[in-house]
Amino acid sequence: MMVERHWNQIAPGVFQRRYDPLDISVGAVLGGHGVTIIDTRNNEREAREIIDEAAAQFGLPIVAVINTHAHYDHTFGNQLFAQQGIPIYGHHRIPAHFEQFEKPRLELVRRSPELEPDMDWDGVQVTPPSHLLEQPCMLSLGGRDMRVIPLGAGHTDTDLAIHIPDAKTWFLGDIIEQSGPPMFGSGAHPMGWPGVLEFLLKHIQPGDVVVPGHGEPVDREFVIQQLHCFEQLAATLCAALQNGTAIKDIVFPAEVRALWPADFLLEAAKDAYAQLPGAQ
């Protein structure tokens, strides 16, 4: 996989930059008065790269940040933007998710850095968005209109869809992934995920550009294909729970196994069994 090392224009005034590690999608939406950045990466040093490279590329001030969801690789750079007085928008459940998942993981790695030696989290201050969104709204940031839609529980219960109507472009975070399979764990809701994608497909039009949390931009058909896999996954997990099947004995359809490796499916089953009615 080749990760592009520049800002790629994917629609008029809309750019994506794919950063290593983890092939993280960072968005830049240009208006007449400034740039809105979508997601902030993994730590202060990585956030500084975004700020410096956006300044060099666009020559406009950063007027806002939007978080697609709460996971560390998309939000642990928030602190640097907040220190500069830049407003950050995100799902209203991000603070609760931070307390339940991201802060404990951060504290564990600080106590035992050998567990995840590549994280570079010494200086991270977990920083929730300054503007917490509960309902869909239209934001005008830097002179550009963006519709921001809090979603139901799917990849997390903090997922946000960002639609730039005049560019026919969507940033969906990890609700859709292209360069690897969608991830479970850390607050995932595999049973709710199909409904989130069904909702989005009512709004995503043929010809729209869809930017995943990891990987290159895709189209509506790609979202439909990933939905089919999630539907099969959810149906399999629901039937297994109803039949009393142990997690280790679940047999997944071939299409599901083609998208997700066995360890991912094990994580999905653990999530679903903990969340489905009747789970112990």
Image (tube, grey):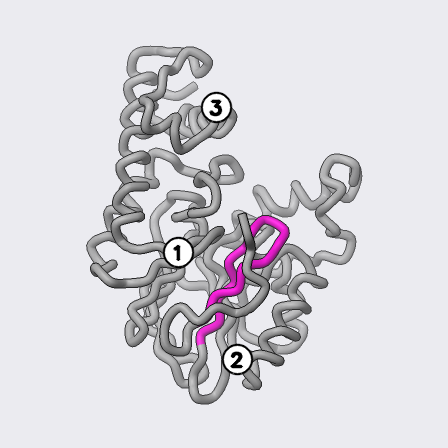
- Residue 212 is left or right of residue 76, and the answer is left
| Closer mark to the observer between disc 3 and disc 2 | 3
Q: Disc 2 designates what residue?
A: 63
Pointer 1 local density, CA inside 10 Å: few below 14, some 14–19, many at least 20: many
Residue 52 is a magenta residue:
no
Give me the residue at 38% from left, 64% from top.
Answer: 162
The dot on residue 172 is 1
Tell me residue 80's x, y (percent). Answer: 67, 68
Residue 26 is a magenta residue:
yes
Q: Distance between the residues labelled 1 and 3?
A: 25 Å
Specify which label sits upstream in the sequence, 1 or 3.
1
Label 3 sits on what residue type?
Ala
Query: What segment is highlighted magenta in the picture?
Result: 15-29
- Residue 107 is left or right of residue 71, and the answer is right
Specify which label sits upstream in the sequence, 2 or 1.
2
Q: Distance between the residues labelled 2 and 1?
A: 20 Å
